[in-house]
Amino acid sequence: MAARDRTMSEAARAASGKRVDLLLIADMVRPGSRVLDVGSGDGELLELLATTRGCDARGIELSREGVNAGVARGLPIIQGDADVDLADYPDNSFDYVILSQTIQATRRPKWVLEQMLRVGSHAIVSFPNFGFWRMRLDLLLNGRMPSTENLPYSWYDTPNIHFCTIRDFVALVEEVGARIDRAAALNGYGHPVRFNMPWAVWNLLGEQAVFLLSRKG
Amino acid sequence: MSDTTALRDLPAYEAARGEADHPHSAVVRFGADKPLALDAGGVLTPFQIAYQTYGTLNAARANAILLCHALSGDQHAANVHPVTGKPGWWETLVGPGKPIDTERFFVIASNVLGGCLGTTGPSSTNPATGQPYGLDLPVVTIRDMVRAQAMLIDHLGIEKLLAVVGGSMGGMQVLQWAASYPERVFAAMPIATAARHSAQNIAFHEVGRQAVMADPEWRGGRYLTEGTSPRRGLAVARMAAHITYMSDSSLHRKFGRRLQDRDGHTFSFDADFQVESYLRHQGEAFVDRFDANSYLYVTRAMDYFDLAAEYGGVLANAFRGTTTRFCLVSFTSDWLFTTADSRAIVHALNAAGAQVSFAEIESDKGHDSFLLDEPEFFAITRGFIDSAARAVGVT
């Protein structure tokens, strides 16, 4: 997985300077809990969770630059690969396992999601929604793979190899037998889509989505 | 810190031998009331530990950092070495304003058990005979070294160390500290190390030991008593070992196939190549400051190290329930203590639920990278130590 995309648009940052998607995630985490952030980048979310939620928050990050920047800030981050290393964690060793803006860059998204739900009692997944209307329009009108401010890569050099839409993700959640506890979508301006609407609408209006999952039963 | 002026007129070798009983550093002597239990069985008594300290212990006694040295290191981590006159081996990392900041922290470095710079080792005088121990000293282990260090830390009146930091064999000691005394170690930084010595590394050590023991001047380990010195054997051991501390690319970059002060091959066995000349120099310089028997003892201690073996073969059990926070570092070109070795420790720490950071540093300088100018490594060390200091309220 690549370092978390640091080219998020300015609109996606709250007045505090924090990324809105990370604030949404932090809001889903119970204060004081144990959290593993998979694909932790340079540790922005870890720091947010530690300072505002009092969490014991740890990270796994593939890129050496991300790890070294985070560790140099005193954050507990391990250089590692989510596609492999999640297998090394014991069952139920965390309250939450978070995969933020990373699932589309994993080689085995389903396996990663299953591992997250084994290692943590909850999983939180945020991802760019490929069903967002602008993506659809882009492909429809231009006939080329969409490239946006948040996802600026060309198809041939993108780390994002497994794009999905909100509806695709909901189907995957069903397949791995997880329960959706909460969900949120961010529109193109980085604001939450507030209305309680069917997935099909979220799938159109949400540029990004955040899901809080837990194991069934 | 000690005045080294008196040594300048003496040959370095004599100076080094003089360090064994009367080191140019602080020393603590443990008498019959405080014997050291050894893994080999029995106890060592009396014995002494030579150490240096830098900075000031704060009122809460909470700012102490213990440095653990590698095979050829000693207590002179951040001061001019009394024998060689060279800077301390970790002055890159330790000092005022450095990542391990001696203006904030009380930094302790001690010579290991079995060493030759003032902690009891084979060149120390055996009180039972009045002669150097030689091979009469029991074989010591990494755990023995750490047990002795714990007695030093007791002596200094320190209950809990803010951090224990070390590379290579020093990293083994850090791991042992965290396993044996988890309640006494707030933060642990094992660098370029492994939880057990590999077959390949044992093999390299055996080559070095055989070189020492094959030197006729070794005299079955009694060379100090007999007035000889296995210089050539120890130099060869050091030359062989030194290759393992570097990498193919760093040797190539430094020397390539360049010739040493000559225009062509001499068709002899002189040091035609710069790399030969360099290694010979490394060997020569080493024998001036290091004791041949200490080389045997300390390499043996590393060979015997297998932390998991003490815990039913499961490394994670060594750290079960630990509250120590860890930061592991490896270097890409280190083929002696590889990234995979560090990763195995990280996996065990994860399985034990420990808080752990792990970074691999890009460097072509091989195992020695941890002693060299590696800005990224320095930044990580500073970040990790600072965050530990913040967590315990050390300003």
Image: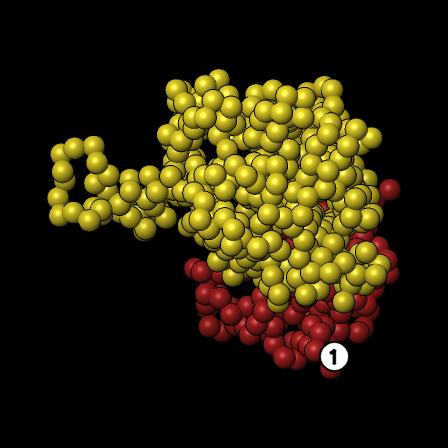
Chain colours: A red, B yellow
Q: Nearer the viewer, residue A162 or B289?
A: B289
Asked if residue A150 is positioned above or below residue B365 in the image, the reply reads below
- Amino acid carrying label 1: it is Ser
Q: Mark 1 — residue?
A: A16
Number of callouts: 1
Quadrant where the image shows the N terminus of chain B: bottom right
Write down the quadrant of residue B178 in the picture: top right
Question: Where residue B335 appears, x then y in whole percent?
Answer: 46, 39
**Which residue is found at the position 76% from the left and 45% from the top?**
B153
Task: Mark 1: give few (<14), some (14-19) or many (20+) Cα within 10 Å.
Answer: few
**Along the horizontal axis of the image, is B309 left or right of B266?**
right
User: Is any atom of residue B109 visible in this view?
Assistant: no
Write down the quadrant of residue A63 in the picture: bottom right
**Along the horizontal axis of the image, is B292 left or right of B193?**
left
Question: Where residue A50 appears, x then y in whole percent?
Answer: 78, 62
Quadrant where the image shows the C terminus of chain B: bottom right
Q: Nearer the viewer, residue A166 or B128?
A: B128
**Which residue is found at the position 73% from the left and 82% from the top?**
A15
**Along the horizontal axis of the image, is B345 left or right of B271?**
right
Question: Where residue B211 appears, x then y in whole percent?
Answer: 41, 24
Give the chain of mark 1: A
Q: Nearer the viewer, residue B259 or A137?
A: B259
